[in-house]
Image: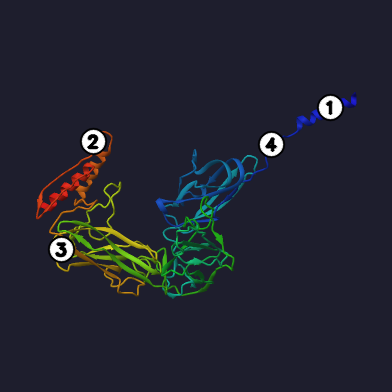
């Protein structure tokens, strides 16, 4: 009996002390704080300040509290709250309560900027204290440097790189200089380009991983490279880099640019540093690090913050003017498609005036046929909520010449045209206008285009019948103020309580050998538009 009782008591004790599956005592969860060891505040930053990032990393940490003490920055750095409130009575101490952290959480506790009257080297140390349920209390620090104006780190302006073979590799070796009075303990170089694919050859550089999209051509994919140099660049010195950056050239690329700029921790929000959740990670290179190389003369280092070098290939682009005829009776308003076609083989990208030696813009010139008037005030889609933008230089009707802009990217095999409305005013024997593709206003030839014969296309005028006043759908003949009034009338008509009635007009009038009949206009604003157009013809 005694033995049975003992066995029963032991079993009961086991039941009382057993821990159900999944309810084991929680493991200790420490929170890691990721911050730059040094921040350099050399200007006011965007919006009057620089957001100060702090990243917390943990595996299922609960009841997380982060306290940031920036009291040592008083007098050198202006601080205002952003994500985290100040502690009462302690204007330089902030407390963040993200509660739970599972993975990565990025906080911006405050916004900082250099105070008035600071000198190079002023600043202080920021302390980060983080606690979590069941974890250790940890403390991290970073140094904040404040200095007036620009740091004076500059990039050398490089000569254009021309005649690059498609499918090959292009090399680029920048040089850097320090024109300031401070010696940063570390700095970085950022390179950005479109189309060129960087070879990941330097392990102190991080390379972007653009998302692959089937509809996006290789020549349109943007790439970034961020390299960190853990060595000082002393004031008054200029150095080239020890290794070149190399880029693979796509087969269809005609021209692009590599922009490059120096940064200090805290200056470039996209530079390497604390990770940003939701942003695709950059990958490190696998080769030897790029470092500061030999000294060079301090010549050719402009004072602005970023420079670019042109890279052009041997690939040509056959740009062709596109035009359709103006055909109708006197008084008709005719829609005509005008523009340009890229017959390849190269994709064209406009680089802008900031890149030395590159075409600033791509245009096509329209000269209307004699006896016609091009009217920019036509709304091709009167039912749309937004007005159609005018892409040419002059918005007045009846000009002798219009210069219209093509988009910045123009892939091979594609066509870029727009609808233009011409009013036929008189019969003119043999009249013809023209469309001509230009690279930069006033230039004679498109960039990278050896075929001159198809840069210009005629816009022939064919007048049929004895007269008429046909109005194409979308034509209004209104000025901007009249068009705005029409828009308001259309909105009132479509609003609750508006008439919403179908309007059917039959207007008959003699007009220089023709009769105008406008019928079946279903909306009031369309009827008003037709009446205004009819009155314009009579006058």
Q: Kindly state the secondary structure of the residue where label 1 is placed.
A: helix
**Disc nearer the start of the sequence (3/1):** 1
469, above or below 444, in the image: above
Q: Which residue is mark 3?
A: 371
Image coordinates for residue 335, horizontal then vertical, percent: 24, 57
Residue count near mark 2 (Cα–Cα under 10 Å), binned few <14, some 14–19, many ≥20: few
Give residue 23's mark.
Answer: 4
Q: Is 446 displayed left or right of 471 in the figure?
A: right
Residue 236 visible (yes or no) = no
Q: Image quadrant for the N terminus?
A: top right
**Disc nearer the start of the sequence (1/2):** 1
Looking at the image, which is closer to me, 269 or 3? 3
**Disc nearer the start of the sequence (1/4):** 1
Q: Which residue is mark 2?
A: 499
Q: Kindly state the secondary structure of the residue where label 4 is placed.
A: loop
Label 3 vs label 2: CA separation? 41 Å
Number of numbered tags placed on the structure image? 4
477, above or below 251, in the image: above
Looking at the image, which is closer to me, 260 or 12? 12
Label 4 vs label 3: CA separation? 89 Å
Circle 4/circle 3 CB separation < 8 Å: no
Label 1 vs label 2: CA separation? 90 Å
Circle 1/circle 4 CB separation < 8 Å: no
Residue count near mark 3 (Cα–Cα under 10 Å), binned few <14, some 14–19, many ≥20: some
Label 3 vs label 1: CA separation? 113 Å
**Disc nearer the start of the sequence (4/2):** 4
Residue count near mark 4 (Cα–Cα under 10 Å), binned few <14, some 14–19, many ≥20: few
Looking at the image, which is closer to me, 510 or 234? 510
Q: Which residue is mark 1?
A: 8
Circle 1/circle 2 CB separation < 8 Å: no
Observer-side mark, 4 or 2, equals 2
Q: Kindly state the secondary structure of the residue where label 3 is placed.
A: loop
């Amino acid at each position: 009996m005694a033995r049975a009782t003992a066995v029963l008591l032991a079993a009961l004790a086991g039941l009382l002390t057993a821990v159900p599956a999944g309810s084991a005592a929680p493991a200790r969860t420490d929170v890691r704080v990721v911050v730059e060891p040094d921040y350099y505040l050399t200007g006011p930053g965007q919006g009057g300040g620089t957001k100060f990032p702090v990243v917390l990393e943990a595996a299922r940490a609960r009841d997380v509290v982060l306290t940031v003490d920036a009291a040592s920055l008083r007098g050198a750095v202006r601080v205002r709250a952003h994500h985290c409130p100040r502690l009462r009575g302690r204007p330089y101490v902030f407390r963040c309560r993200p509660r739970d952290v599972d993975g990565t959480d990025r906080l911006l506790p405050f916004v900082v900027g250099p105070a008035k009257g600071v000198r190079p080297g002023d600043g202080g140390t920021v302390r980060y204290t983080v606690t979590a349920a069941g974890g250790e209390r940890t403390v991290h620090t970073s140094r904040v440097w404040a200095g007036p104006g620009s740091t004076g780190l500059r990039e050398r302006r490089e000569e254009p790189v021309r005649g690059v073979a498609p499918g090959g590799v292009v090399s680029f070796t920048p040089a850097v200089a320090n024109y300031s009075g401070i010696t940063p303990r570390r700095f970085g170089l950022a390179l950005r380009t479109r189309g060129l694919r960087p070879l990941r050859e330097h392990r102190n550089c991080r390379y972007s991983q653009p998302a692959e999209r089937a509809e996006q051509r290789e020549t349109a994919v943007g790439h970034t490279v961020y390299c960190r140099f853990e060595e000082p660049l002393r004031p008054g010195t200029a150095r080239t880099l020890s290794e070149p950056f190399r880029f693979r050239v796509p087969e269809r690329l005609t021209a692009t640019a590599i922009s490059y700029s120096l940064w200090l921790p805290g200056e470039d929000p996209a530079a390497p540093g604390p990770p940003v959740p939701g942003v695709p990670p950059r990958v490190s290179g696998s080769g030897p690090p790029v470092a500061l190389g030999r000294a060079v003369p301090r010549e050719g280092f402009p004072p602005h913050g970023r420079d670019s070098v042109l890279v052009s290939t041997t690939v040509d682009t056959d740009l062709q003017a596109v035009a359709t005829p103006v055909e109708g009776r006197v008084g008709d308003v005719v829609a005509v498609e005008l523009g340009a076609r890229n017959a390849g083989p190269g994709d064209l990208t406009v680089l802008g005036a900031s890149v030395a030696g590159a075409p600033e813009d791509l245009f096509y010139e329209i000269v209307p046929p004699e006896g016609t008037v091009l009217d920019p005030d036509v709304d091709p889609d009167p039912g749309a909520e937004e007005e159609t933008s005018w892409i040419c230089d002059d918005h007045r009707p009846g000009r002798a010449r219009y210069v219209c802009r093509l988009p910045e990217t123009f892939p091979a095999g594609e066509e870029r045209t727009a609808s233009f409305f011409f009013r036929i005013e008189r019969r003119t024997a043999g009249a013809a206008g023209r469309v001509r593709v230009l690279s930069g206003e006033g230039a004679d030839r498109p960039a990278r285009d050896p075929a001159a014969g198809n840069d210009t296309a005629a816009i022939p005028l064919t007048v049929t019948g004895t007269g008429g006043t046909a109005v194409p759908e979308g034509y209004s003949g209104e000025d901007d103020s009249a068009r705005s009034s029409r828009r308001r009338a259309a909105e009132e008509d479509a609003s609750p309580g508006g008439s919403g009635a179908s309007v059917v007009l039959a207007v008959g009038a003699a007009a220089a050998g023709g009769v105008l009949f406008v019928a079946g206009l279903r909306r009031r604003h369309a009827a008003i538009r037709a009446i205004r157009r009819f009155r314009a013809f009579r006058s």
